[in-house]
Image (cartoon, grey):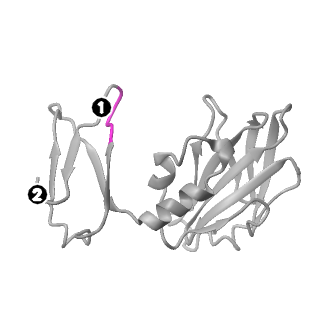
Amino acid sequence: MSLDLARLGLAGRPLRVRDLPAGPGDVPAAAFDAGRGVLSVRAVAPHRGRFVGIEAVVPDAQAALAAQWPAWAGGGVPGAIEDFGCARAETRHFPVGQAPGVACADAAIQISMWQLPDRIVLAVHNTDGKTAKNADIQLDLDALNLTPKLPWQEFIGVRQLVAEEKAPPPILDFYGRRLTLKALPPAGGRVIGVRRY
């Protein structure tokens, strides 16, 4: 399939291709030749489809995100974080203890944040090396620009982007303006995305 990269606003820019498996057992099947603007997808079974994303990347923003990524989360920035839109020039990073509109009463819970106009990503770390903890995080949704402006048309979504296996899902109490992460493991953490849709 040929793509007109100029009409898509992607010509002459570094690109990233994400081939998203459509179901269990699927393996990546897309190849992209940016020079020719040709996307090839192989092994699409009858009555099946593939989801392939192509986006322009900002190398400086990717490098900044990699430099800001917490050591406790290890292994470099996961694709889920970039897929959530954090590697952009307009992303603002707030180190531990400096995130406006975000607070936790437990001093052992440290939080850093990346912010865009319609979303935040929180890296929540339990610094207690011996005890699992629940993190009750107060979120000022108004200050964070996350309060839906069109009732019944917009909503807030919460996604667990990085977590240990079988981690309980995050719980957002919209009216109480509280995000709860249960049983953060000792010296571990999770990365949570909160977005206004």
Q: Earlier in the sequence, mark 1 or mark 2?
A: 2
Between 117 and 153, the one lying in front of the other is 117
Measuring from the top left, give residue 182's x and y in whole percent.
75, 38
Name the residue rendered at 21%, 36% in the picture: 48
Q: Nearer the viewer, residue 130 or 142?
A: 130
Q: Position of residue 72 (x, y in %)?
A: 68, 43
Q: Considering only vertical position in the picture, is 34 above or below 58?
A: above
In the image, the segment drawn in magenta is 20-24
Q: Circle 1 sits on which residue?
A: 27
**Image spot of residue 147 (x, y percent):** 63, 69
Q: Nearer the viewer, residue 170 or 132?
A: 132
Name which residue type carries label 2: Ser
Image position, residue 176 (x, y; %): 78, 58
Look at the magenta stretch and give its main secondary structure. Answer: loop
Q: Is residue 80 above or below residue 62?
A: above
Residue type highlighted by circle 1: Val
Looking at the image, residue 133 lies above or below residue 136: above
Residue for point 31% across, 63% down: 14
Mark 2 is surrounded, within 10 Å at the Cα level, by few (under 14), some (14 to 19) or many (20 or more) other residues, namely few
Residue 2's disc is 2
Determine the secondary structure under disc 2.
loop
